[in-house]
Amino acid sequence: MKFKLITIGKTNKSYFLEAEQEYHKRLAKYIQFEKTELPDVKNARSMTEAQIKTEEGKLILSKVDKSGLLILLDENGREFSSAGFAKWMREEMNRGHKTITFVIGGAYGFSDEVYAAAKLRMSLSQMTFNHQMVRMFFIEQIYRAFTILNNEPYHHG
């Protein structure tokens, strides 16, 4: 099984990159994990929010495995506890998905086409975090979920 994380824009803070890389390395014990950073839309300053979302949506959908499961990280999505997220992941993995793709969109959210393609919208918190922090938090939560599923002490350590 492959887990993918698609993001808009690059992480440019070394401390976030180091944390992401650490958890990415730890995840290798459990799953194949791939992070894809899509470029920011060119000429965005001369575009409307809707146009930006449409262009980002085209980029996102071009990278999604159509036979896999698509999950959007969205401020209005379903919230999970860490244990609840681990349980949800186990259920979805047991359904036999070849790929589970999570997407962290741009500043304005997602296009209607991306929302339509997704099975679930997920929120990490009711609080707002910058996109670079969310990437790090989310990769850590995937790792935490696997330690929970494997009864390893990380979750309470």
Image (tube, helix red, strand yellow):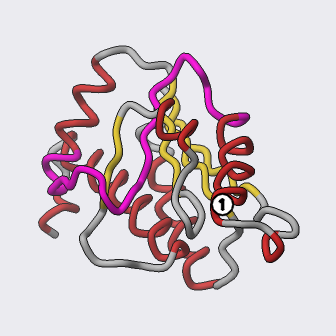
Which kind of residue does numbered mark 1 sit on? Ile
Q: Which residues are magenta?
A: 62-85
Query: Looking at this view, is 53 or 97 the one in front?
Result: 53
Most extreme residue toward the right is: 43
The image quadrant that residue 95 belongs to is top left
Which residue is found at the position 29% from the left and 45% from the top? 146
Q: Is residue 51 above or below residue 29?
A: below
Q: Is residue 23 above or below residue 91?
A: below
Magenta span contains residue 69: yes
Quick one: quadrant of the C terminus? bottom left
Magenta span contains residue 3: no
Give coordinates of residue 34: x percent, y percent.
61, 44
Query: Looking at this view, is 7 or 126 the one in front?
Result: 126
Query: Looking at this view, is 21 or 76 the one in front?
Result: 76
Which residue is found at the position 22% from the left and 26% from the top? 91
Give coordinates of residue 47: x percent, y percent.
78, 67
Query: Looking at this view, is 147 or 63 the one in front?
Result: 63
Give coordinates of residue 97: x percent, y percent.
42, 19
Which residue is found at the position 26% from the left and 49% from the top? 145
Q: Residues within 10 Å of mark 1 (few under 14, many from 20)?
A: many
Q: Is residue 74 left or right of residue 39?
A: left
Q: Is residue 135 left or right of residue 73?
A: right
Q: Is residue 6 above or below residue 107?
A: above
**Residue located beneath label 1 in the image:** 8
Per the image, label 1 sits on a secondary structure element best described as strand
- Count how many numbered circles sit on residues in the image: 1
Which residue is found at the position 44% from the left and 47% from the top? 72
